[in-house]
Image (cartoon, coloured by chain):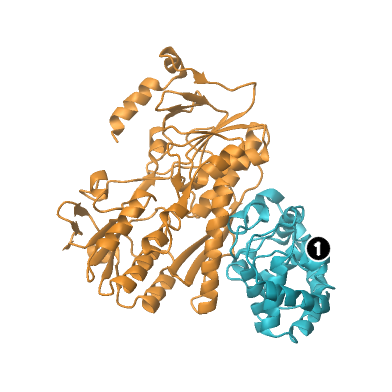
């Protein structure tokens, strides 16, 4: 959690500085609706790869956008897009998606991988990714029923180091094989 | 397609009094509810209708669109390349009906801005408090000999559907070793990266089925969207197959076709390609001209904050027909503009000052089955004008890895699924 907390603290300062420069901001809905083209109406993605935003906590949304902006998180287009929004605008968007229920995706997963992933989850991940990755309040994203290609890409980027993992996560991930990580992703994709 | 007769008809039909006098009742506002009429059911119009109802279900929204189905122009190049069926681009209007939108299949023949009425070819008139016009594009007569009959021999395929199918079937029928000629249009036009993505998709098909064939692009421009990335893709995947000729080298690109003889000419030379894909210069869709919403440029001037026409108050023009630069004429931009216009219309009919707008655009191009590139930008209003947010946006890096390019294809397909659901679902 330490990295996440640091992001949030940094952002808190940014908001104070930014407030003085703000003129009129678009409404939260106006801002969040622009995301729908790629992430689906109300942040419910039809897939096959772009992640759902619906249901993720405000803190996780803000941390992610700030990480895209400052290069701590890789994205094909998200680094370019995140730079288009002020911290205040990001906070407004976050408020919209946090109000949505966590969506159930319709995708195929491998039952044997799901079974192995469940065991690995209970040993390694459940403390931060509570309720099989479906709890917004853990501020660790919604990974339950998230689109599988997105989950795999995220882990590839964490492992290669071009996205920064929280320290606790890194300690766990460094001890997992690629097959085990794949099993975990199938497990999360199958939840809800 | 006789404009002169149509205009006369509209002059005749131009007032509600005349319409009523000959027996067609005007469809009036019921029970004092606010009425919005949306003209055109493409990416812009359908999104606007839906987002008005989402924001304020008390507003009665009527969408008037001649066709029962819409074929998206975006991703139609994949149909031409052969990896996608035309049916996957086909969308109906049941989704909009479920949002309580009245969908009317009819052709709008006139808009009476002073009387706030939309008139259709069946003789009905629809009263409105606010009107949204999203007619897409129509073609200019910039190429001698290119008319609707010629388009059946030399498809533009710049409005998806039968034209897309025709171009694909011509590629399938052409001999190995033939030349496909693409006449690329001048700015501004629908889908700036489109002709160059199309060249990729055609080359992808030809490389696998007719590898001795070539593609010749005769452009009316000296540079084009994502040029560096496209040039790189042509070199990487289709080496020696695609030749691009800038406008300066032919003194302005294609000027004349003879559809019966199968010839395509510039000022300097004449070609006889196996397949000719002629994409003419463009202007706003016809109804925008008929309704007097266009200026001398052939496009519709709008107020950046609300997309309300600066010519006729109470009418908002969105999508390809509007003068929206620096936003591009793209499907995503039309979807984004529609939401801005919808929010403004909801505010205005409720007597509120419209809020600050925000727009985004991401355009993907599939240059090979596992190689996608993109351009993205966020836009905001600065001093009353649409402006790019400084420091944001940009292109796929030229040195991005094959794995990242493959991800862009996955995200491009996700974009198609999500944006079409956002528009029609």
Query: Among all residues in the image, which is located at the extreme front?
Result: A112
Q: Colour of chain A?
A: cyan
**Chain letter corresponding to the colour orange:** B
Percent position of residue B228, x then y: 42, 72
For the N terminus of chain B, which image quadrant? top left
Q: Mark 1 lies on which chain?
A: A
Q: Nearer the viewer, residue A148 or B355?
A: A148
Q: Nearer the viewer, residue A26 or B286?
A: B286
Local SS, label 1: loop
Query: Among all residues in the image, which is located at the extreme left?
Result: B261
For residue A76, what is the image quadrant?
bottom right
For residue B379, what is the image quadrant?
bottom right
Percent position of residue A92, x then y: 73, 55
> Left of B116 or right of it: where is A49?
right
> Left of A149 or right of it: where is B178?
left
Q: Residue at x 82, y 66 (%)?
A: A131
> Left of A139 or right of it: where is B405?
left
Q: Is residue B405 visible?
A: yes
In the depicted structure, whether residue B323 falls above or below residue B17:
below
Kindly identify which residue carries mark 1: A135
């Amino acid at each position: 959690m330490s990295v996440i907390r640091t992001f949030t603290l940094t952002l808190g300062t940014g908001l104070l500085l930014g407030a003085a420069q703000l003129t009129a901001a678009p409404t939260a809905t106006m801002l969040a609706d622009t995301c729908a083209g790629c992430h689906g109406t109300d942040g419910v993605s039809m897939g096959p790869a772009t992640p759902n935003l619906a249901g993720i906590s405000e803190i996780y949304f803000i941390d992610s956008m700030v990480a895209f902006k400052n290069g701590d998180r890789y994205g094909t287009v998200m680094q370019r897009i995140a730079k288009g929004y002020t911290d205040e605008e990001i906070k407004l968007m976050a408020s919209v998606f946090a109000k949505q229920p966590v969506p159930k995706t319709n995708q195929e997963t491998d039952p044997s991988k799901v079974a192995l992933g469940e065991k690995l989850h209970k040993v390694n991940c459940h403390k931060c990714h509570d309720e099989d990755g479906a709890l917004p309040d853990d501020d660790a994203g919604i990974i339950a029923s998230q689109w599988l290609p997105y989950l795999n890409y995220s882990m590839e980027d964490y492992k290669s180091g071009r996205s920064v993992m929280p320290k606790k996560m890194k300690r766990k991930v460094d001890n997992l094989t690629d097959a085990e990580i794949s099993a975990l992703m199938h497990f999360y994709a199958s939840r809800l | 397609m006789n404009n002169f007769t149509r205009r006369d008809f509209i002059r005749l039909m131009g007032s509600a009094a005349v319409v009523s006098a000959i027996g067609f009742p005007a469809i009036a506002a019921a029970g004092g509810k606010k009425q919005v009429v949306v003209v055109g059911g493409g990416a812009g119009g359908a999104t606007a209708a839906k987002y008005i109802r989402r924001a304020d279900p008390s507003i009665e929204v009527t969408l008037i669109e001649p066709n029962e189905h819409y074929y998206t122009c975006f991703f139609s190049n994949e149909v031409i390349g052969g990896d996608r069926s035309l049916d996957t681009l086909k969308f109906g209007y049941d989704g909009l009906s479920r949002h309580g939108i009245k969908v009317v299949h009819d052709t709008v023949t006139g808009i009476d801005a002073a009387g706030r009425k939309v008139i259709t070819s069946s003789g009905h008139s629809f009263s409105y408090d606010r009107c949204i016009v999203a007619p897409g594009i129509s073609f200019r007569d910039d190429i001698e000999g290119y008319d609707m009959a010629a388009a059946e021999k030399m498809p533009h395929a710049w409005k998806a559907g039968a034209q897309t199918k025709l171009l694909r079937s011509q590629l399938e029928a052409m001999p190995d070793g033939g030349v496909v000629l693409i006449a690329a249009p001048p700015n501004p036009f629908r889908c700036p990266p489109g002709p160059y993505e199309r060249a990729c998709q055609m080359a992808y098909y030809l490389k696998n089925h007719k590898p001795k064939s070539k593609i010749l692009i005769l452009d009316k421009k000296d540079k084009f969207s994502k040029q560096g990335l496209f040039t790189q893709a042509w070199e990487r995947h289709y080496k020696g197959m695609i030749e691009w000729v800038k406008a300066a080298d032919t003194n302005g690109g294609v000027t004349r076709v003879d559809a019966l003889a199968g010839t395509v000419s510039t000022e300097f030379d004449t070609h006889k390609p196996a397949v000719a894909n002629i994409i003419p210069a463009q202007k706003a869709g016809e109804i925008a001209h008929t309704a007097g919403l266009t200026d001398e440029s052939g496009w519709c001037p709008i107020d950046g904050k609300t997309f309300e026409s600066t010519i006729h108050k109470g009418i908002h023009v969105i999508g390809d027909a509007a003068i929206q630069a620096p936003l591009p004429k793209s499907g995503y931009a039309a979807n984004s503009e529609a939401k801005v216009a919808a929010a403004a219309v909801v505010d205005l009919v409720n007597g509120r000052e419209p809020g600050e707008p925000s727009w985004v655009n991401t355009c993907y191009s599939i240059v090979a089955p596992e190689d996608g590139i993109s351009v993205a930008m966020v836009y905001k209003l600065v001093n009353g004008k649409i402006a790019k947010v400084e420091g944001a946006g940009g292109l796929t890096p030229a040195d991005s890895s094959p794995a990242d390019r493959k991800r862009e294809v996955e995200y491009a397909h996700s974009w198609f699924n999500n944006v079409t659901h956002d528009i029609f679902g």
